Image: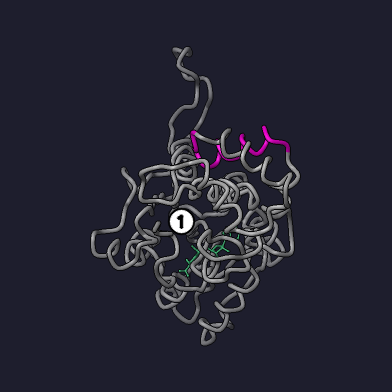
C-alpha cells in the first residue's frame, strides 16, 4: 500500500517561527500574505503588527478564504481580503491605493483542505472528479486535459512539470484508456498509471503525474514569476520577501529571481567591462534555503519538502 504523503495530516502552518524571524513584521507594518490558506501565518503576523498594522491577503480558493475569515474574525477590520490569483497583486494594491508594503509572504501550493475534499480531485487515494483547480471559478480541469489533449501534449506536461521520465508511457496509456471510456476520476487515472509503472519506490507511481497536472491547470510556475515580481516592486526599502516552496521547479524560480535582484551586474560572461548599469536591489537573507527541523518534519509530513528563502530590499 502506497502512502499519499501530501495528505497525511491536517493543515499546520509550515516553518511558522522562521517565517516570523525572516519576515520580521513590526508594529504598524503593512504586510501582504499572498497565499492566505486558512490564515495560519497571517494570524501570527497580525499579532506582531498590532492594532494599527494592516494585512492584505490573497487566495484564489474562495472556500479557503472564507474559512480564513472565520479564523481571523477578531482582526477583520485590519485585513483586506482578495479572492484572486496573486498574479493580480499589483492591480489589487492599486485598487486600494497601497503603493508600498513592508513585507510579503508566499507559502506556495495547495492546502490540506484541497486533499481533504475528494471531489476536488487532488488526491489519488480518494475517489473524486479530476478537477484540481484551486480556483473553481476559472480555467480548465485535469479531466478536460486528459480526455482532449493529444498524446504528445499530455506527455510533455507530465515530463515538464512532473519531471517524470516515463511520461511517454503514461501518456500512451491514458490515450488508450480514454478510447474505451472517458477518464473522469482520480482513482481511474491512478489505476491506469499504476498498471504501466511498477516501481519499487514508496511513493505511488501516479505522484509525479498528479503533481504535473496540478501545476499545469493552476499555471503555478507562470503566476509565481508574476506574483514575485509584483511583490518585490511594491516592497519599500528594507521590506522583506519570504517564499516557501514545495518542489524543485518552484524553488528554482525563486532562487533565480532572488539572484537577479541581488546581482551587481547582469552583463553576460563575454563582456569584460560592465555595461548594464544594474544596481543591487536586494540582500539575500538566506544563503541556503531554510528547511524544517526534524521535529517539524516528524509532526507535519507536509513540511518535509518545504524550502524557505528570504530577502530584504535595499
Ligand atoms: C500552503 S497554503 C497556505 C497556508 C497558509 N500560509 C496558512 O498558514 O494557513 C496555500 C494557499 O495558497 C493558495 N494559492 C496557491 N497559489 C495561489 C495563487 N497563485 N494565487 C492565490 N492563491 C494561491 C491556495 O489556494 C492555498 O489556500
Q: Residue 165: image x %, image y %?
A: 49, 33
Q: Is residue 229 visible?
A: no
| Magenta stretch holds residue 153 | yes
Does residue 34 sit above or below 272 in this rendering? below
**281 horizontally vs 136: left or right:** left
Magenta stretch encompasses residue 185: no
Q: Quadrant of residue 3?
A: bottom left
**Whole-percent x, y for residue 11 in the image:** 44, 71
- In this rendered view, identify the residue nearer to me: 32 or 149: 149
Residue found at x 44% / y 79%: 50
Q: Disc 1 on helix, strand or loop?
A: strand
Q: Residue 172, position in %: x, y? A: 63, 36
Query: What residue do we see at 54% from left, 46% from top?
Result: 193
Front residue of 239 and 83: 83
The residue stretch that appears in magenta: 150-165
Residue at image location 38% in from the left, 54% down from the top:
306
- Residue at the spot of label 1: 239
State yes or no: Cβ of the residue under disc 1 lies below 8 Å from any atom of ligand 1. no
Ligand 1 location (quadrant): bottom right
Amino acid at each position: 500500500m502506497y502512502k499519499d504523503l501530501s495528505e497525511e495530516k491536517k493543515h499546520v502552518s509550515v516553518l511558522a517561527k522562521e517565517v516570523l524571524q525572516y519576515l520580521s513584521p513590526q508594529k504598524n507594518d503593512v504586510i501582504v500574505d499572498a497565499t492566505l490558506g486558512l490564515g495560519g501565518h497571517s494570524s501570527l503576523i497580525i499579532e506582531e503588527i498590532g492594532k494599527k498594522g494592516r494585512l492584505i491577503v490573497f487566495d484564489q480558493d474562495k472556500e479557503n478564504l472564507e474559512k480564513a475569515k472565520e479564523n481571523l474574525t477578531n482582526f477583520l477590520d485590519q485585513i483586506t481580503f482578495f479572492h484572486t490569483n496573486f498574479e493580480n497583486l499589483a492591480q489589487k494594491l492599486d485598487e486600494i491605493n497601497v503603493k508600498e508594503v513592508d513585507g510579503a509572504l508566499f507559502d506556495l501550493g495547495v492546502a490540506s483542505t484541497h486533499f481533504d475534499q475528494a471531489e476536488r480531485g487532488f488526491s489519488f487515494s480518494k475517489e473524486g472528479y479530476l478537477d484540481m483547480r484551486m480556483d473553481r471559478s476559472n480555467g480548465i480541469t485535469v479531466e478536460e486535459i486528459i480526455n482532449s489533449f493529444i498524446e504528445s501534449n499530455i506527455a510533455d506536461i507530465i515530463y515538464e512539470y512532473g519531471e517524470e521520465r516515463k511520461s511517454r508511457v503514461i501518456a500512451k496509456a491514458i490515450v488508450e484508456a480514454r478510447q474505451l471510456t472517458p477518464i473522469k476520476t482520480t482513482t481511474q487515472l491512478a489505476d491506469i498509471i499504476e498498471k504501466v509503472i511498477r516501481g519499487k519506490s514508496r511513493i505511488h507511481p501516479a505522484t509525479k503525474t498528479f503533481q504535473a497536472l496540478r501545476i499545469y491547470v493552476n499555471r503555478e510556475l507562470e503566476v509565481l514569476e508574476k506574483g514575485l515580481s509584483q511583490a518585490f516592486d511594491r516592497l519599500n526599502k528594507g521590506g522583506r520577501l519570504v517564499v516557501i516552496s514545495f518542489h524543485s521547479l518552484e524553488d528554482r524560480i525563486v532562487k533565480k529571481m532572488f539572484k537577479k535582484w541581488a546581482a551587481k551586474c547582469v552583463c553576460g560572461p563575454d563582456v569584460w567591462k560592465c555595461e548594464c548599469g544594474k544596481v543591487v536591489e536586494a540582500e539575500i537573507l538566506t544563503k541556503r534555503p531554510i528547511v524544517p527541523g526534524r521535529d517539524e518534519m516528524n509532526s507535519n509530513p507536509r513540511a518535509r519538502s518545504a524550502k524557505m528563502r528570504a530577502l530584504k530590499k535595499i
